Amino acid sequence: MNPAVVYYGDDFTGATDTLGTAARAGLRALLFLKTPDAARLAQAGPLDVLGIAGAARAMTPNAMQGELAPVAALFRSLGARVLHYKTCSTFDSAPHIGSIGAAVRALRGAVEQPWTAIVGGQPNLGRYCLFGNLFAAAGAGGEVFRIDRHPTMSRHPVTPMHEADLRLHLARQGLADVRSVPFTAVSQGPAALEEALQRALRQPSPDADTHAEAVLFDVADAPQLATIGQVLWAQARRATLLAVGASSVVDALATALGARGDAQADPRHVTPARGPVLVLAGSLSPVTARQVAAARSFDTVWLDAPRLARRDPAALARHADQIAQGLARGRNVLACTRPAEQELTEGKVDAQALARAGGDLLAKVLAKVPLQRIGIAGGDTSSHAVQALHAWALSYVADMGAGASLCRIHSDDAALDGMEIMLKGGQMGSEDVFERLVHGAPDRPLQ
């Protein structure tokens, strides 16, 4: 009953999206908040997909080596077939921080295949890879841009995307020989795709190696994922495989793994919250700003971001008291780092320090008032916020739409065990996602 797939999410929000992808496909899945030991594995029971949430996208290459070594060891011990390094769907990364190349170097020794599969798109989030170039929508249903011209990702404060060709982008991170399989081959079916893959692997190498380092698979539309998954699973059954990409990797493999899941696919919807809801919005993206503006069911608390980032204890205590008092009165509270119209540049506030402060703030609030449901917006904020909780795993509850899942916390602390949490990246979620967290998620957007 070993899992077929072990994945590591390079941030917590993306890790929960992959969890939801697996669960909605009817696969047994659980997301651990650190590499599990034998006791936790026994507590979890049989799984098809085992996830580990991490924060590698905010780490240096040296730190990533230490972070990923236990993941590689766990994969080898479990007998899984695919090791998935889950990246952001926009592939934002850099040689010095969150390097995908460094992750591949840390993990490829754990698998038998000498090459790494890279799945280049996630159509359900508006991410497409065409002839090796990445395109992404600006928000749910928004206009699609080449990633180096994307209004947000081209100007990301930590890892701006200045190159759309993922082969060149990854070469700068040490993956010098990335071959490409175009979407035109994928669209012709599994046999044609397998032939195109073998041609790519046989291409002459620019150095002395006899095999490619990686193969990038284009993705033009959602049906192509099943074709890619069929070919990748056939490869993985012959020899274990390292796969890189967004939740589309598990989405691609889901059809091939369908016989392993004993549950039916279940697109569960969010029920109304039982009690007040807290949302901590640490993201500064335009998408999150629109979601904040649409959150009509909340009392808004504007956080003093510069003082929180400096770890000012007085500011932390004041905000924690203010938020807790509103929640104790039965009010939903939305704690935000800035008003939408106020500019907050990287030079004024350390984004990582602010994310860590968000974790401290959440822990203080939950120590004052118990809650049934919370939401966190922002990849780094989510990672630090969850790490501040005494939890060991997350399981899937329901679909929040557009790359966001509602999850259940598993904790040895009775006050936290069973609490529901939504983690979403800055670019993820519908405009009414915070309202849905309070009122539930019907089949159509809330009016």
Image: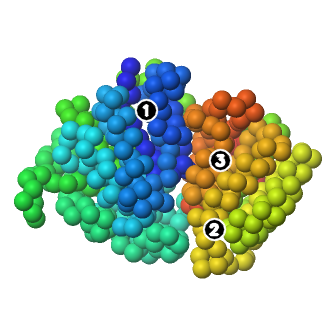
Kindly identify which residue carries mark 2: 284
Mark 1 residue type: Val
Q: Using the numbered discs, state the Cα–Cα distance from disc 2 to disc 3 in whole angstroms.
A: 21 Å
Mark 3 vs mark 1: in front: 3
How many C-alpha atoms fall within 10 Å of the one at disc 1: few (<14), some, or many (≥20)? many
First along the sequence among labels 2 and 3: 2
Quarter of the image containing the N terminus? top left
Q: Using the numbered discs, state the Cα–Cα distance from disc 3 to disc 1 in whole angstroms.
A: 25 Å
From the top left corner, tell me how far across and down residue 36 is, in percent.
Answer: 48, 33
From the top left corner, tell me how far across and down residue 149 is, in percent.
Answer: 44, 75
First along the sequence among labels 2 and 1: 1
Kindly identify which residue carries mark 1: 49
Q: Residue at x 19, y 32 (%)?
A: 238
Q: Nearer the viewer, residue 189 or 132?
A: 132
Kindly identify which residue carries mark 3: 388
Horizontal arrangement in the rendering, residue 324 relative to residue 446 (left or right)? right
Horizontal arrangement in the rendering, residue 170 relative to residue 271 (left or right)? left
Q: Nearer the viewer, residue 432 or 250?
A: 250
- Judge whether residue 272 can be spotted in this image: no
From the top left corner, tell me how far across and down residue 210 is, in percent.
Answer: 8, 53
